[in-house]
Amino acid sequence: MMNITQKRLDKAVESRRAIKYFEPSFSIPEKDLITIITTALNIPTPDDCTPFRICRIEKNTELRKKIRNVGFDQPQHTDASILLAMCVDLRILASGLKLDLEADSQLLRDKAMFYSAMFSQGIMVSAASMGYDTCPMIGFSFDEVGKLLNKPEHVILTNFVALGKRCKAPLPRGSKREFNKIVYLNNFPDK
Ligand SMILES: Cc1cc2nc3c(=O)[nH]c(=O)nc-3n(C[C@H](O)[C@H](O)[C@H](O)COP(=O)(O)O)c2cc1C
């Protein structure tokens, strides 16, 4: 069992990286996955509804290999300890937002992406605080994965989150812009 060190939340946010190579033999215990997901569920959702659905793809299965095949052969799909297909049930979201499933379909899709991104980030930060690594992933065929998951029409697949333990250090971070260049007081500065 590898050594896992819990981190303070600020350090967890700072140290979270999108990991490309996971240790294939590493396993995250079930109780930790439950903690990670239930903690992340504390994000704000409309009308306090829970529109999220997750297909958790079992390790060492044909399904993992098939997902990798339609996912640009990315090793995280097979090697991560846990692979979560993040989905949103549009019927539940529509009811929470008081929107119409048909007439407001584009708006609902936008909102689904927004809420699922927040949930995914919650999962990644929660996992990082427990000492685990993650990778958010949209590099795959959404149509093909949707078929593999037997996804119903009223459910939208938004991304994967892979979780595990890194076995190769990520490249150094790209430069992030300074506070003053991205945060304006009240309104946009003149050109
Ligand atoms: C929406 C989204 C989708 C991503 N999809 C993939 C992916 O399919 N495969 C991958 O290796 N990384 C993926 N990444 C990770 C990015 O490559 C990575 O976040 C970016 O290079 C910044 O690195 P960092 O998160 O380590 O700071 C994705 C990131 C985001 C935000």
Image: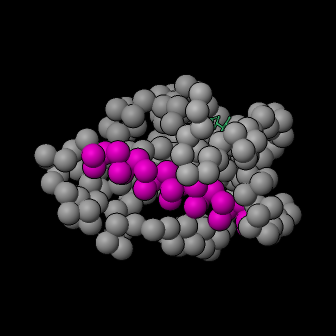
Q: Is residue 116 above or below residue 48?
A: above
Left or right of 105 on screen, residue 88: right
The quarter of the picture where residue 54 lies is: bottom left
Give ligand 1's quarter of the image. top right
Who's the residue at 78% across and 34% down the image?
Answer: 175
Q: 56 or 121, which lies in front?
A: 121
Q: 39 or 168, which lies in front?
A: 39
Residue 1, position as x, y percentages in the image: 82, 63
The residues colored magenta run 107-130
Left or right of 73 on screen, residue 70: left
> Is any atom of residue 132 visible in this view?
no
Q: 154 or 96, which lies in front?
A: 96
Is 120 inside the magenta-drawn segment?
Answer: yes
Q: 38 or 104, which lies in front?
A: 104
Who's the residue at 23% across and 50% down the image?
Answer: 154
Who's the residue at 74% across and 67% down the image?
Answer: 9
Residue 33, position as x, y percentages in the image: 60, 67
Residue 95, position as x, y percentages in the image: 21, 64
